[in-house]
Image (spheres, helix red, strand yellow):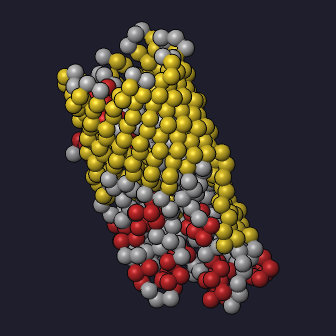
Amino acid sequence: MRLKALATLAAAALPLGVHATDGYFSHGWGMKAKGRAGVSAAMTDDAYGGVNNPGTMVWAGQRFDIGLDWFSPDREASRTGTTATLGPANIDGKATSDSTNFYVPELAYNHMLSPTLSLGVSVIGQGGMNTNYPGGQISAASACAGFNPTPGPYNLLCGNGRLGVDLAQLVIAPTLSWKFLPDHSVGIAPLIGYQRFKANGLQAFAVISNDPANLTNNGYDDAWGWGVRVGYYGQILPQLAIGATYATKIYMSKFDDYKGLFANKGGFDVPQNLAVGVAFRPIPALLIGVDYKWIDYSGVDSIGNPSSNALNCAAGITSNCLGGSNGAGFGWQSVNVWKFGVEYQVNPELTLRAGYGHTDNPIRSQDVTFNILAPGIVKDHVTAGFTYVFGKKHELTAAYMHAYKNSVTGSSLINPFAQALFGVNPNATEKISLSENSFGLAYAYRF
């Protein structure tokens, strides 16, 4: 009961939007990794190995890390092209998400049971499908009335009131790490997942839902789940280290209050992922790291199923309706992520960091409509940071990240429905855009 209370309290501080940089995963966990653009698979300098690479924890020593990140995404969505064919009934519109400031805590602890064995815990938040658009962009006299019988005015997806979703995820990773040879170690971290979700303003989606009563505006629902992460770390040469880690899906219980929205009656698992990395030290003061990461978004039905399945729902195939066994989803593809980071130790007290990350865009143009709710589309980000050691046992770390603006434009999913309802094809296109900034501070105590 104490664990559930702690997770619920922590999740309340993690409104979604938190670090939608690698899809909806953070670009890194732990402020040191964030200063290196997320490079962490072959790094051993903090206690976040439970979520980065459990094999590294036995090298981190006995320490406590705690941090807070300010995260600011800028999200915009628009629709054009319905003016000519629908005339005064057009449903063109534009909106900017109001929620732009999030404060994301993280903490970790590592205890050395012996020189070759450690036991610790890492706790992080992640997310990236938060949006909070104001309503009223589309007039009550518009064609939205054909999709939604409730009188307008309407939001950008023809619903009523504010439009958006809010998903917060918390991962707790108790971690056991073992140095089985002087230069090699492995680790395992059971992953305890907690998440909460709400959706607002999706009333027009009722016509493609198997359960309209559990589709939208039902407040927060929550879910628990489990998975496991394993990892390996090896100091191959004095100048060269390697690391590899894999995490299963976190198999979550279902969102019963939104079983008319997500596939498989409310299923929303956390996707499996893997990472490999190298760390090279050409001179004692300089460390260069490279990571490759794969995140299997397409392996989670509610995330990866094509949004075009909604068209089959309209044709009478109920399994393709929202909430169905093959229900329409966000259409996210699995992504490949590359991260490059450098550290330079100016003196025993001060270490500087910088990095660059590149992520595949998980969202294709044909899935833009649904992803007005979840525009996790940034591809390139740069980072900088530092650690300052004081009093021998204390560390202060800072990290900054900027993700460059990216946009995706595609044909609106509304087009075929408008043709069926009104006998016209408006040829509407929709555009989603996202850019991000974050700045975090962390404190560590080395026992």
Please identify the quarter of the rendering in which residue 233 is found. top left
Q: Among all residues in the image, which is located at the extreme bottom? A: 423
| Residue 405 coordinates in the image, percent (x, y) | 67, 49
Q: In the visual, does 409 lie left or right of 51?
A: right
Q: Nearer the viewer, residue 336 or 382?
A: 336
Q: Quadrant of residue 106?
A: top left
Residue 411 showing in the rendered view: yes
Vertical side of 158 occupied by 6: above or below: above
Q: What residue is rendered at 37% in x and 54% in y? A: 272
- In this figure, what is the number of numbered marks? 0
Identified at 39% across, 34% down, the residue is 242
Quadrant where the C terminus lies?
top left
**Residue 437 visible (yes or no):** no
Task: Tell me residue 184's x, y (percent).
Answer: 28, 31
Q: Nearer the viewer, residue 118 or 287?
A: 287
Whether 72 is drawn above or below 47: the answer is below
The quadrant of the rendering that contains the N terminus is top left
Residue at the front extreme of this rendering: 237
Q: Residue drawn 71% across and 74% down?
A: 428
Looking at the image, the residue that sits furthest to the left is 114
Residue name at image x 63 percent, y 52 percent = 434
Counting from the top left corner in percent of width and height, residue 121 is at: 29, 35
